[in-house]
Amino acid sequence: MSRLDINRSGEMEVFARVVELGGFSAAARRIGMTPSAVSKLVARLEGRLGARLVHRSTRQLRFTPEGEAFYGRCRAVLAAIAEAEREVAAGAVPRGRVRVNSNVPFGLHWLMPLVPGFLTLYPEITLDIVATDMVIDLIDERADVAIRVGPMRASPLIARKLGESRMAVVASPDYLARHGAPATLEELERHNRIAFNFTRLVAGWPFRDASGATVTVPPVGNVLVGDGESARRLALAGAGLARLSHFHIGPDLAAGRLVEVLADVNPGDTETIHAVFIGQGAQLPARVRVFLDYLADHARVG
């Protein structure tokens, strides 16, 4: 065949109506065609199949064994098409692989605890999770969803806000007992500040000075890390000061494992957490949509 015949299901539906309604005229009225057009369509179908499907007479149509067999196959094909359309329209049972890229703190402290409950609801979905604080390209990495923390760059991606959380400079009680708690920005200069070894949109630590203006202090120290969870663990171990988000260290602050310092000059800035993805509405696969909905409902970051 020289071209793709994209109207075979339409021919099958017309032929099925001819069989079910007992004639060309009745079928034509049901589907909005003329009797001659229906007759020509069936003749064309017979020509392509190389088999007589209908014996015509002035009084009635009689279907050949080949026509009856073809009608049975038509019904099966049309039923399968209808079922496929219903499944897609209703979302069916979401299934397949959802590739998720998350920054390390959100992945460990928020995403991982949600996985068992999500998979209980959607056992046909496989979650493929990569945790990294590096910003990845969704298309290059073939990711369906990425968790982005901090300012959003201009992008064609769709973003769904999961929450926002205040930033704080913290240290362990042990570190503060050994080095003292900085009371001013000048005293901060003599403290070890845990830094990141990758480029960030906000490079330094912002504070308010005596005039109320925002000043930025570079995080200078003798240790750099590639993710926020490593910075948290080093702070807990007494290696220095770290500037982290409350969504990450809230339980540590509540338990006294970490202590906030320089709170009086904290500018009150926040980190916003977004789930970003490609496509929306009907373009978004059901497996991705239900994951995003579950994440938004259960990961209430504040």
Image (cartoon, rainbow, N blue to C red):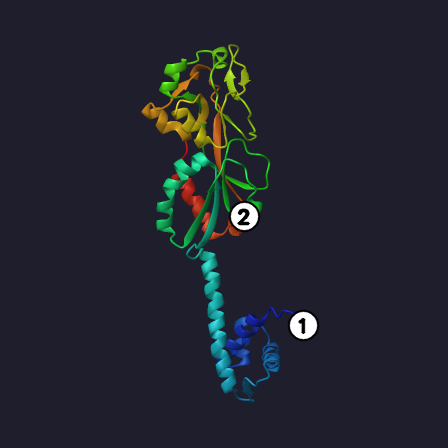
Report helix, strand or loop for mark 1.
loop
Percent across and percent down for residue 145 are: 50, 44
Percent across and percent down for residue 89 are: 47, 57
On residue 222, which mark appears?
A: none
Quadrant where the C terminus lies? top left
Would you say residue 21 is visible in this rendering?
no
Quadrant of the image occupied by residue 96: bottom left
Observer-nearest of 100 and 43: 100
Report helix, strand or loop for mark 2.
loop
Quadrant where the N terminus lies? bottom right
Q: Is residue 139 left or right of residue 99?
A: right
Observer-nearest of 254 and 166: 254
On residue 142, which mark appears?
A: 2
* Vertical position of residue 183 compared to residue 42: above or below: above
Observer-nearest of 216 and 154: 216
Residue that numbered label 1 is attached to = 2
Which residue corresponds to the image point at 60% horizontal and 36% vertical from the top-left?
Answer: 154
Distance between the alpha carbons at the discs numbered 2 and 1: 35 Å
